[in-house]
Amino acid sequence: MKVLVAIKRVVDYNVKVRPKADGSDVDLNNVKMSLNPFCEIAVEEAVRLKEAGKVTEIIAVSVGAKVVQEQLRTALALGADRAIMIETDNNVQPLGVAKLLNAVVAKESPDLVILGKQSIDGDNNQTGQMLAALSGMGQGTFASNVELGDGSVEVTREVDGGLQTVSLKLPAVVTTDLRLNEPRYASLPNIMKAKKKPLDIFTPEDLGVTLAASVTTLSVEPPAERQAGIKVASVEELVDKLRNEAKVIS
Amino acid sequence: MSILVIAEHDNASLKSSTLNTVAAASALGGDVHILVAGSGCAAAANEAAAASGVAKVIVADNAAYGNQLAENIAGLVVEVAADYDYVLAGATGNGKNFMPRIAALLDVQMISEIISVESADTFKRPIYAGNVIATVQSTDAKKVITVRTTAFDPVAASGGSAEQVAIDTASDAGVSSFVGEELAVSDRPELTAAGIVVSGGRGMQNGDNFKLIEAVADKLNAAMGASRAAVDAGFVPNDMQVGQTGKIVAPELYIAVGISGAIQHLAGMKDSKVIVAINKDEDAPIFQVADYGLVADLFDVLPELEAQL
Ligand SMILES: Cc1cc2nc3c(=O)[nH]c(=O)nc-3n(C[C@H](O)[C@H](O)[C@H](O)COP(=O)(O)OP(=O)(O)OC[C@H]3O[C@@H](n4cnc5c(N)ncnc54)[C@H](O)[C@@H]3O)c2cc1C
Ligand SMILES: Nc1ncnc2c1ncn2[C@@H]1O[C@H](COP(=O)(O)O)[C@@H](O)[C@H]1O
């Protein structure tokens, strides 16, 4: 079986991002960039399926500027067999990414496509579901467990009240939640080996996809700051404040 | 203008997030209709019809929609959406699951988790774990939007008397099926709708110690939440996680116990009206957002707090 894993380069999760002074966009000058945490989990899940003998080939794919090669190399070092980069300098929105991924799906016919549930920059949580729609596949979003069978996959999903399990016909789309697995670190020898693994480059035109950006960001601003509060000295004082000052308990 | 709101429900009753979503729809101006797609969902449809500000309720009662499978719901909504300018749902687990699928089938971008309606085509939404608020404009003819429910006060659950129209399309995409579920049963208020939330973090040390939180929550009729660290460590189930990638809450009172205040956690609770932090580390970042901070050992504080409530 062949697995396609979609990965995104994003601001590292430890960075506290701020708007630029003119409010035109966020300030990403000199900030650390990483593989989106949910995409790390996606790669890890594919690698585990391969280690379990259920998967024979893992292809990592990313859409973005030339620099996304760094994250593709990371995915190769973690265990992907080859990589596809769809190069564009435009900021591609989720529907556009999904259309490009759908074109790769048409070329590669994977049995399973694994994506992160959410990119931690745009916080969209859309791309996997959109790819599933465009390709007509079933979707197992927010997965905390994946059992790959012969013609189907059982996905346990994190839902508001707990967990839900669905069965999907293959090929299918899975998006990862945090508890699906604990991603490994790439070892030095694997990082070296990854440099020699194949990486193909396409443009959106090569794939016959025209990108339209129908949602524009007009401005960005910091969120409302909270007033600095006070420290209380005792439980008694706390209860008194909550009752008589904030009036949130009776 | 006409707006279709997709109801959040469990067939037997309507979830309150639907009322927040109707509020966002009302802010757009125009006729608000609710689609109740489910199986044996008449009770939920009746509640939807009673909600204030709703002109019509469309009921699709069919086994294919019983478990809210995204593939089936999306097929249905795409048909129904032909008559509407907007499709809205709450940014709940279900809404996040099926709305992007609907948007892609309609060939439009989707706008996730809006926190305000600026005009008919312009909205605000948080990005980067809520560290930045973006104002976005959509030129799509049909707008597919999820609503951060905590940002819109719910419309009244009663007072309306919308007409109900049944439709009998059965859209089974045939690619997915429901196997089972494990839902937490609790008498507590729902986490995302509770007036008071008491959350525990890694500082709780183990699942058993959450009994201390439970005792306080009982006194306050509060919901219980947790940080990701507490969930990851297996202290409590995943549906209690508050944060960027968990649940978003904005109660009147949020009490954070043994939680350091990582940005990903703050993203889920910093719009709470009053925040209390109990932490033994006076430099914990949670104190920067807390209205009332108590620097103390939680194992001393929680029993005392329970006794004084
Ligand atoms: C992609 C991604 C998404 C994430 N999403 C979320 C999310 O949605 N929600 C979330 O919460 N986190 C999320 N995180 C994790 C987040 O970064 C933090 O790791 C997590 O919130 C820390 O949880 P904590 O505060 O319980 O633990 P810690 O940071 O370990 O803090 C424990 C606190 O307890 C205090 N303490 C210990 N013992 C006592 C005692 N006896 N009395 C009083 N205080 C005590 C300590 O002083 C400390 O401040 C995410 C991370 C990533 C990478
Ligand atoms: N530019 C991209 N290239 C490859 N995969 C992407 C890209 N953008 C999003 N994805 C995938 O879609 C997931 C969800 O992203 P989003 O819908 O933006 O929250 C990510 O975790 C990735 O797996």
Image (spheres, helix red, strand yellow):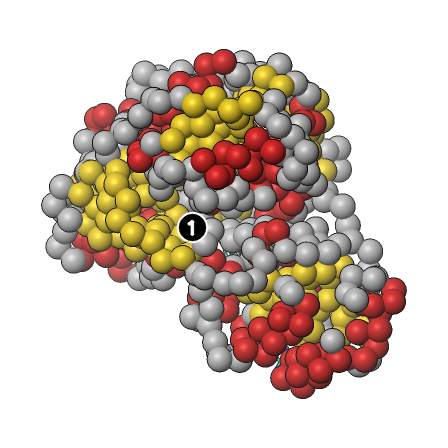
In the displayed structure, would residue A132 be above or below residue A192? above
Choose top left, top right, bottom left or bottom right for residue B73: top left
- Asked if residue A114 lies left or right of residue A91, the reply is left
Residue positioned 58% across, 42% down in the render: B17
Residue positioned 87% across, 67% down in the render: A244
- Asked if residue B288 lies left or right of residue B25, the reply is right
Q: Position of residue B1 (x, y in %)?
A: 62, 14
* Nearer to the camera, A222 or A227: A227
- Asked if residue B259 lies left or right of residue A198, the reply is right
- Dividing the image into 4 quarters, which one contains the C terminus of chain A? bottom right
* Nearer to the camera, B23 or A238: B23
Q: Crowding at label 1, few (<14), some or many (≥20) Cα neighbours within 10 Å?
A: many
Choose top left, top right, bottom left or bottom right for residue B62: top left
Label 1 lies in what chain? Answer: A
Q: Position of residue B66 (x, y in %)?
A: 35, 39
**Secondary structure of the residue carrying numbered label 1:** strand
For residue A125, say whether it is visible. Answer: no
Which residue extends farthest bottom?
B300
* Nearer to the camera, B20 or A16: B20
Disc 1: which residue: A159
